[in-house]
Amino acid sequence: MISEQTKALFEREVAKYPATQKQSAVMACLQIVQQEQGFVSAESEKLVAEYLGMAPIAVHEVTTFYNMYNQQPVGKYKLNVCTNLPCQLRDGIKALKHLEHKLGVVMGETTADGLFTLQQSECLGACADSPVMLVNDIHMCSFMSNEKLDQLIDGLKSAEA
C-alpha cells in the first residue's frame, strides 16, 4: 500500500503536468519511493504504475534504464564507476578492479558492513575527466587514480568512525 504521506507527495508531482499526462511524473514518483524505502522493489513499481495509470512494464523500464534507481538495498555509499569505452581507454576498468580489491567485493555487491555498494555505470558524461565515478548519484569524482580512490574510501570510512 501507498501511505497517505506518499500519496500526497505523488499528487504534488502529478500536479506539475497536464491531467492527461500524469505518467510524466513517473521518475519523481520512483524517487519518492526510493527515498522512503532505500530502493524500488517490483511491488513498488506496480504501485506507482497503478497510481499513474501506466503498464507495470513501462515503470520497470524506467527503473532499469537509469542508474539512480536501486532495485535492491544498497550500502550507505553507492559508487558508480564509469566503464564505457572512453573511460575504459583511460583506466576505468582499472579503477573498478582497484575498488573491488580494496573493498573486498565484486561489482554489484555491497560490503559486509553495509557501507559501500560498487556498481558500474555506462556513461557519466565526463569522458575527458576519466576515470570517473559518481557517489550516491550526486557527487562526480574525476581523474580517479588509485591514490584518489584510496583517499575517498578511507575518508568515507573515517567519517563513519
Image (cartoon, rainbow, N blue to C red):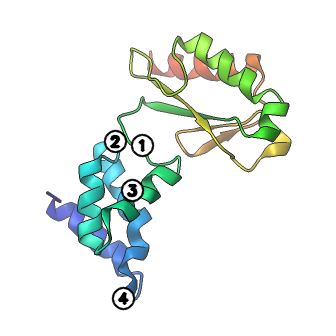
Nearer-the-camera pick, 88 or 31: 88
Left or right of residue 141, residue 117 in this image? left
Badge 2 marks a residue whose secondary structure is: loop
Between the residue at mark 4 and the residue at mark 2, the CA separation in whole angstroms equals 30 Å
Foreground label between 2 and 3 = 3
> Which amino acid type is shown beneath numbered disc 4?
Thr
Foreground label between 4 and 2 = 4
* Residue 99 sits in quarter: top right
Q: Is residue 70 above or below residue 32?
A: above
Q: Residues within 10 Å of mark 2 (few under 14, many from 20)?
A: some
Between the residue at mark 1 and the residue at mark 2, the CA separation in whole angstroms equals 8 Å
Residue 38, which numbered label?
2
Instruction: Tell whether label 2 touches label 1 (CB within 8 Å).
Output: yes
Instruction: Point out residue 40 in the picture as x, y percentages from the top left corner.
Output: 34, 48
Look at 52% across and 53% down and name the residue there. 65
Between the residue at mark 2 and the residue at mark 3, the CA separation in whole angstroms equals 17 Å
> Which amino acid type is shown beneath numbered disc 3?
His
Look at 52% across and 16% down and name the residue there. 158
Badge 3 marks a residue whose secondary structure is: helix
Between the residue at mark 4 and the residue at mark 3, the CA separation in whole angstroms equals 21 Å
Instruction: Tell whether label 3 touches label 1 (CB within 8 Å).
Output: no
Which residue was labeled with disc 4?
A: 20
Nearer-the-camera pick, 71 or 57: 57
Mark earlier in primary sequence (2, 3): 2
> Which amino acid type is shown beneath numbered disc 2?
Gly
Which residue was labeled with disc 1?
A: 70
Between the residue at mark 4 and the residue at mark 1, the CA separation in whole angstroms equals 28 Å
Which residue was labeled with disc 3?
A: 60
Instruction: Tell whether label 1 touches label 4 (CB within 8 Å).
Output: no
